[in-house]
Image: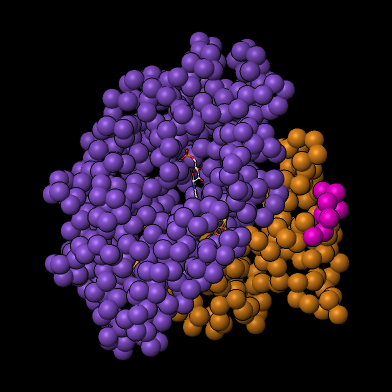
Chain colours: A orange, B purple
Amino acid sequence: MYSNHPSHSQQPIVFSQEMLDQSQEIIKHYPEGKQKSAILPIMHIVQKHFGWVSVEAQDIIAEMLKIKPIEVYEVATFYTMFHLHPVGKYVLEVCRTGPCMIRGAEDICKYLEKKLGIKEGEITADGLFTWRTVECLGACGYAPMMQVGEHYHEYLTPEKLDNLISDWKTK
Amino acid sequence: MGRKLLLEHAKVPGIRHIDTYIQHGGYRSVHKALKTMTPDEVVEEVKKSGLRGRGGAGFPTGMKWSFLAKPEGIPRYLVCNADESEPGTFKDRYLMEYLPHLLIEGMITSSYALGANTSYIYIRGEYRWVYTILVEAIAEAYAKGYLGKNILGSGFNFDLYVQPGGGAYICGEETALLESLEGKRGNPRMKPPFPAIKGLWQSPTVVNNVETIAAVVPIVNEGGDEYAKIGIGKSTGTKLISACGNIKNSGVYEIDLGLPVDEFLNSDEYCGGVANGKRLKAVIPGGSSVPIVPAGLFYKNIKGEDRLMSYESLSDGGFASGTMMGSGGFIVYDEDQCIVRNTWNLARFYNHESCGQCSPCREGTGWLVKVLDKIEHGKGATMADIDLLWDIQRRIEGNTICPLGDAAAWPVAAAIRHFRDEFEWHIKNPQLAQSKNYGLVKETVYQTV
Ligand SMILES: Cc1cc2nc3c(=O)[nH]c(=O)nc-3n(C[C@H](O)[C@H](O)[C@H](O)COP(=O)(O)O)c2cc1C
Ligand code: SF4
Ligand code: FES
């Protein structure tokens, strides 16, 4: 059954009024008939709200934009920022590209793996954390660095990671 | 002391807000252009300035603007490329984060010149807080009457929107960017037609980098001739350089083009030299896509002349002994860095970011990663693998729809060209190579393959 696939939501997906209003506001940015352009901005809204973008959410986007579901699926799978299956509440995305690598990104990943006790892409048992590597985030001068939600954390050290993680655990 | 045309007020408290920005001379170019100049006169000043695109290719901006088709009754668009994903590059982020109104001002003045009544800033999705800064600044500009209908009573109507991307390096390529802005996968288009004829929604479109558009502001304020006095030869004006890697002072610097590379790398005003007293091994001066150059070819070109931070000087010697200005992503490698590991890492980046449309790029980058992985991780590589790498990169270059293929090939070619002995050492000492770095290259390096 497809519905058991991790890309499907186990709960009904409902867009809040705020999400619908924000989406309608975005659609006004484009000329008549070009509302398809709103896919990426709306997917960001969805991910912010639900933490990830399920197939059900993509179907709602398709309906809203009056396009075929496949047109949303093919976009969702192209762009790396969207989580297409559930992830931890905090997703730690460590930059692994050259300039960050030469300033210790690999050690940061090893440290996270040990500290959180999970491999890249997994979720901690308490559901709080996922970590993964990503490509250059445009913070190369402030390396090593990672993105968590809307924030960049730069000049990372094990101590800095310890503090951040304990903060998130108590939030 | 370098002149600052763009970043002069970057650290003024409150400069993100329109009132402070105006107090420091902001939005003068909009008054000047909309009230005293025709659109063609603005284009003329940009031509005179000699400004070249700051996104990487260095194409003259005035010329690009004059190619824009102007059929009756069809809208035209200016799209600002704020996708900034080239490894080593973080200058556009700095400009937008500190001076959002400088970009907005440039967008208004440039769109007026091009006759665009709607424009978009396409910003990489990861810069979420910068997106918010821009959205707030745009709202301020609407409130002050710099955006919207009949701006300053000139009859010019102009709307500006910010569009977030979704995490894809390829969307920095201008036609992939337009596809993405249309709500599609970021697959680059076949050219021709060029965006100047058929761009966003098949309408004539100019795509320009953030820094290019910001530079239009001082050009209109001071005049193209004044701008052209700065710099050297065909490298006019100032350039933002984002410096990273093993240096003392990482960050974003605005330099007059033509500054000696030695001064940029070693003076305390800029990079402050290689960090921790180490020696310099190599530099990639223009973002990961441009060829790496060893220290010996960096300070001086093959003729023994001092190398300068300019389009011409950096590319002096072609790919045999030179490199490129690119996007200004200046990456410095100290003596402890492993060139093979770095090349493998960057090949993996391009393989990851290939959109997959053309087989030389999709398959070729995969092969590069496989062979480099074998060499770097001691998995039984032989000397023939170096030739294989050379062969693969050569078959990618020039055989693809967009230049990402070239961007993947060049770093590999340059690494082999200048650091072949380091690849050989890895193959001869697989155990050692995994635990230790090769260190500085010996004196004899410049064999041209
Ligand atoms: C793979 C690839 C990635 C690119 N990424 C960027 C980018 O992030 N920002 C940018 O301004 N230009 C980028 N470019 C260059 C653009 O295609 C285009 O030339 C540029 O935006 C034009 O602006 P300019 O003339 O102001 O430089 C990229 C090109 C390629 C082939
Ligand atoms: S060169 Fe690579 S990224 Fe560019 S269109 Fe071809 S497959 Fe896509
Ligand atoms: S390489 Fe890590 S942010 Fe650029």
Q: Which part of the image, by quadrant, shows the N terminus of chain B?
A: top left
* Residue at image point 37% right, 65% down: B412
* Up/down of A164 relative to A27, above or below: below
Q: Residue at x 66, y 72 (%)?
A: A87
Residue A141 vs B447, above or below: the answer is above
Q: Is residue B36 left or right of residue B416?
A: right
Q: Is residue B8 visible?
A: yes
Label total for image: 0
Residue drawn at (27%, 32%) of the image: B233
User: Dividing the picture into quarters, in which one does residue A30 lie?
Assistant: top right
Q: Quadrant of residue B77?
A: top right
Residue B184 x/y as whole percent: 70, 52
In the image, residue B219 sits, relative to residue A49, either above or below, namely above
Q: Answer left or right for A153 relative to B356.
A: left
Residue A105 location, x and y as percent?
Answer: 41, 70
Q: Main secondary structure of the magenta part?
A: helix
From which residue to which does the magenta span run? Answer: A62-70
Is residue B275 visible in the rendered structure shown here?
no
Query: In this view of the protein, which residue sits in the foreground, B241 or B424?
Result: B424
Of B105 and B366, the residue lying toward us: B366
**Residue under the image location 38 percent in, 19 percent down:** B223
Q: Is residue B54 magenta?
A: no
Q: Position of residue B393 (x, y in %)?
A: 42, 65
- Residue B126: image x %, image y %? 56, 55
Quadrant including the C terminus of chain B: bottom left
Residue B437, quarter of the rendered image: bottom left
